[in-house]
C-alpha cells in the first residue's frame, strides 16, 4: 500500500501541473502523513543535506563552463574543425554534427546547450546544401543527447550522489558507451542519407585545414585537461569543473577574444538559473529518497520482481524498459532522482555492478530527452532550428531506434562497458 501512496501522490501532483520539485516534496509529505510520522523538520533537514554536498559543486561550474564555451567561440571552432575534416564527404555535414556533438560532449556535458549550439550553426548549412531538414534536425537532437553520457556529465554527478557511487568511475565508464552512440548515429545517417540529392562541401585545402585545426586546438584541449586531470588523480571531478570554467573563461576572453567583460553578467545569470533548477530538484528529491527508504518501498518492489533477482540480464532488460517508458514523461534529472533510490537496492541485491548500471541508466534517461511528449532536446532543436516539432519527431525516429539498440546491446553484453571502465580506472 505504501508503494501505491507514493506513486499516486507523485504522479497525481505532476498530472495537475505541479512542478516536479514541489511534486517530490508533496509526495514526501503524503508519505510522512500516511506513516504517522509527519514532521516539518524532516523536510528541512533533508533539503539542507541534499545541497550540503561538496561533490554537487561540480554542477554549477560545469554549467558555467558550457555557457562560457558557447559565448566565447569554442563551440563554433569545434564545428569549423569538424567541417574541415569531414565536410567534403557525401553526407559529411551529418558526420560533422555527430563529430562536433561528441567533442562538445566531452567539454560541457549539457544536452540542451550543445544541441542549441549545433542546431543554430548546422541546420541552416544543411538546408542550403540540400539535406532533408527534419532529418537533419533529428540527427542533431540525437547527437545532443550524447552529452550527458560522455564525461564530464552532470547526470553522472547527480546519479553518483544519489546512489553513493564513485563519480570518477562513472566518468571513465561512460566514454565507450558514448562513443558507441556516436558510431551508431554515423552508421544510421549514412544509411538513410544515401539516396538524397545533396551537395557535399568542397574539400578544405590542407593549408586551410591546418589553420582551422590550429584555431580549434585551445577548444580541443579542454577535454584533455578535464579527463586527463581526473584520470591522473590531479583533480577530483569537482575540481575539474572549476578548472574547466576558468579555462573556458581564459580562452574565450584572452585567446579568441569573443567573450567581452560586458557579456559575463548575462552568462553567469543564465548558468545560475540553470543551477538553481537542478539544485532545487536535488534538494527536494532527498526528502522523497529518505522517506522511500524509511517506508521500505524498495523491498516492496523487490517482492514483485523477486523471480528476476537471480537473472540479472533479464532484470536489467525489464528495468531498462521501465526507465524508457518513464523517460517519455519526465526530464532527465527528475527521472534520476526519483528512480535511483528505488532501483539501487534491487541492483545491489541482484549483484549487478552499480557503475555499469549507472551508465546504462543515464543512457536510458538521455534517450528519454528524444521521446515525446516531453522530449526536451526535441523542443530545443525545434525552437532554435525553426522546424515544426512534429517533423523533428519524424526526423529523429531512425536515430532514436539506433540508440535504443545500442542500449540493449550493452544490456546483453555488459563487458563492453565493464572491461574498458576497469582499464581506464
Image (cartoon, helix red, strand yellow):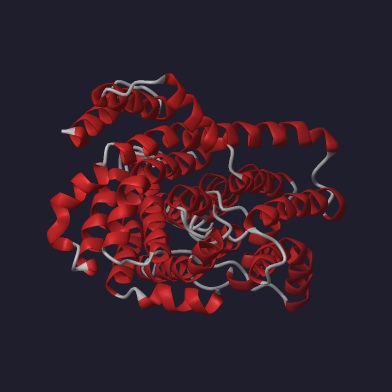
Image height check: is 60 above or below 236?
above
Image height check: is 370 above or below 50?
below
Q: Is 48 left, or right, of 208 in this rendering?
A: left
Q: Residue at x 29, y 68 (%)?
A: 411
Q: Is residue 379 visible?
A: yes
Image quarter in which the C terminus is found: bottom right
Where is residue 109? Give x, y as percent.
Answer: 56, 53
Where is residue 48? Give x, y as percent.
Answer: 54, 31
Where is residue 111? Give x, y as percent.
Answer: 51, 49
Image height check: is 50 above or below 42?
below
Front one among 15 and 352: 352
Where is residue 126? Give x, y as percent.
Answer: 52, 55
Front one among 54 and 274: 54
Q: Is residue 199 visible?
A: no
Q: Residue at x 68, y 31 (%)?
A: 269
Q: Is 270 left, or right, of 128 in this rendering?
A: right
Q: Residue at x 25, y 55 (%)?
A: 319
Q: Residue furthest front?
A: 37
Front one among 7 and 204: 7
Image quarter in which the N terminus is found: top left
Front one among 264 and 389: 264
Q: Residue at x 35, y 65 (%)?
A: 192
Amino acid at each position: 500500500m505504501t508503494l501505491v501512496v507514493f506513486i499516486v501522490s507523485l504522479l497525481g501532483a505532476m498530472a495537475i501541473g505541479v512542478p516536479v520539485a514541489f511534486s517530490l516534496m508533496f509526495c514526501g509529505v503524503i508519505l510522512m502523513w500516511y506513516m504517522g510520522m509527519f514532521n516539518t523538520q524532516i523536510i528541512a533537514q533533508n533539503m539542507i543535506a541534499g545541497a550540503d554536498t561538496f561533490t554537487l559543486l561540480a554542477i554549477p561550474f560545469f554549467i558555467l563552463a558550457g555557457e562560457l564555451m558557447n559565448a566565447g567561440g569554442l563551440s563554433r571552432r569545434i564545428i569549423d574543425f569538424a567541417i574541415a575534416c569531414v565536410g567534403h564527404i557525401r553526407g559529411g555535414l551529418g558526420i560533422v554534427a555527430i563529430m562536433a556533438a561528441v567533442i562538445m560532449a566531452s567539454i560541457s556535458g549539457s544536452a540542451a546547450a550543445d544541441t542549441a549550439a549545433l542546431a543554430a550553426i548546422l541546420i541552416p548549412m544543411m538546408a542550403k546544401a540540400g539535406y532533408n531538414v527534419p532529418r537533419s534536425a533529428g540527427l542533431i537532437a540525437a547527437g545532443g543527447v550524447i552529452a550527458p553520457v560522455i564525461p564530464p556529465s552532470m547526470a553522472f554527478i547527480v546519479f553518483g550522489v544519489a546512489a553513493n557511487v564513485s563519480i570518477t568511475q562513472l566518468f571513465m565508464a561512460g566514454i565507450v558507451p558514448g562513443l558507441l552512440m556516436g558510431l551508431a548515429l554515423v552508421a544510421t545517417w549514412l544509411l538513410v542519407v544515401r539516396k538524397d540529392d545533396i551537395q557535399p562541401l568542397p574539400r578544405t585545402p590542407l593549408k586551410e585545414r591546418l589553420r582551422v585545426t590550429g584555431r580549434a586546438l585551445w577548444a580541443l584541449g579542454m577535454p584533455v585537461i578535464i579527463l586527463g586531470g581526473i584520470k591522473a588523480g590531479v583533480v577530483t571531478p569537482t575540481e575539474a569543473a572549476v578548472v574547466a570554467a576558468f579555462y573556458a573563461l581564459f580562452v574565450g576572453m584572452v585567446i579568441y577574444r569573443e567573450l567581452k567583460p560586458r557579456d559575463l553578467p548575462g552568462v553567469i545569470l543564465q548558468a545560475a538559473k540553470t543551477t538553481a533548477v537542478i539544485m532545487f530538484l536535488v534538494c527536494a528529491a532527498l526528502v522523497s529518497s529518505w522517506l522511500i527508504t524509511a517506508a521500505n518501498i524498495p523491498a516492496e518492489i523487490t517482492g514483485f520482481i523477486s523471480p528476476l533477482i537471480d537473472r540479472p540480464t533479464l532484470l536489467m532488460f525489464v528495468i531498462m524498459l521501465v526507465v524508457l517508458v518513464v523517460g517519455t514523461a519526465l526530464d532527465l534529472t527528475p527521472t534520476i532522482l526519483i528512480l535511483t533510490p528505488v532501483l539501487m537496492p534491487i541492483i545491489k541485491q541482484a549483484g549487478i555492478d552499480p557503475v555499469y548500471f549507472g551508465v546504462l541508466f543515464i543512457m536510458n534517461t538521455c534517450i528519454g530527452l528524444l521521446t515525446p511528449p516531453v522530449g526536451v532536446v526535441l523542443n530545443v532543436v525545434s525552437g532554435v532550428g525553426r522546424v515544426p516539432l512534429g517533423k523533428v519527431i519524424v526526423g529523429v525516429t531512425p536515430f532514436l531506434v539506433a540508440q535504443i539498440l545500442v542500449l540493449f546491446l550493452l544490456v546483453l553484453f555488459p563487458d563492453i562497458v565493464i572491461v574498458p571502465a576497469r582499464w581506464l580506472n
